[in-house]
Amino acid sequence: MLKPIVPVLFLLLSVMWPAHGQAQEVSAGMRVGLSVAELESESVNYETRSGFSFGVFADYGFASWFSSQPELQFVMKGADTSNSEVDINYLELLVPVELRVALSLAVRPRLFAGLSVALELSCRTSFRAGGVVSQLGCADELPEDGGIAFVETRTFDFGALVGAGVDITVGPGFVMADVRYTRGLTNINSQGGDAADLKNRVVQFLVGYAILLAD
């Protein structure tokens, strides 16, 4: 099913650029990292699945100790079972607020928390049987019995996030290292069935670089 990607992109990007005049310090950058994801269900035991994430962000410091850092990222989520893999890719907007402590001019730890909204880009399931791997869309029918390969998933997933990081001054900007946990609040299963309640969980280990634009 074709997702309404273009209108949502314009909406998300508009959130990421507030008026500069309200911020004392403005920086922008990108980060990449590893995502360790799982699906939470009361009826099915899913295993974690590793993936990739990439994001761009802007940081608006409203005080030396307080900032907001909206980010738009591509992130791979999903889960594994004993004989299958579920890959769900999202374009996700994160809007955290941060508390910062300057230990020195070069090192600045951060704690942050906020909300997220994710747009599903794709959902696929891979089955392993006898050394053969078969791939289907999550809502596709299985050719052997006419059942659904996984579930029909919802387009949007709303969530909450917490994390910690540290900025280290290098050159004209900061090297950034972050650990982030995002908990989906939406049941992404839109059809019910055995796995009636499915929610995304993901831990991310990220590194990035930000350049100071204004102070």
Image (cartoon, grey):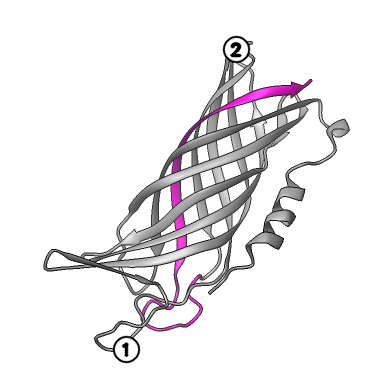
Magenta span of residues: 188-215
Distance between mark 2 and mark 1 Cα atoms: 59 Å
Residue count near mark 1 (Cα–Cα under 10 Å), binned few <14, some 14–19, many ≥20? few
Residue count near mark 2 (Cα–Cα under 10 Å), binned few <14, some 14–19, many ≥20? few
Of the two numbered discs 2 and 1 on the same chain, state the one appearing first in sequence: 1
Residue drawn at (57%, 69%) of the image: 155
**Count of numbered labels shown in the rendering:** 2
User: Which of the 4 image quarters holds residue 18?
Assistant: top right
Residue highlighted by disc 1: 146
Residue 105 lies, in percent from the top left, at 64, 10
Residue in front for this viewpoint, 103 or 88 = 88
Residue 207 lies, in percent from the top left, at 48, 30
Left or right, 199 with respect to 211, comes to left
Question: Furthest residue to the left?
Answer: 130
Q: Is residue 193 magenta?
A: yes
Q: Secondary structure at mark 2?
A: loop
Q: Is residue 118 above or below residue 64?
A: below
Q: Which mark is residue 171?
A: 2
Residue in front for this viewpoint, 140 or 80 = 140
Q: Is residue 97 above or below residue 11?
A: above
Q: Secondary structure at mark 1?
A: loop
Q: Is residue 66 magenta?
A: no
Residue 69 lies, in percent from the top left, at 67, 38
User: As shown in the figure, which amino acid type bears the numbered disc 2?
Assistant: Gly
Residue drawn at (47%, 63%) of the image: 122
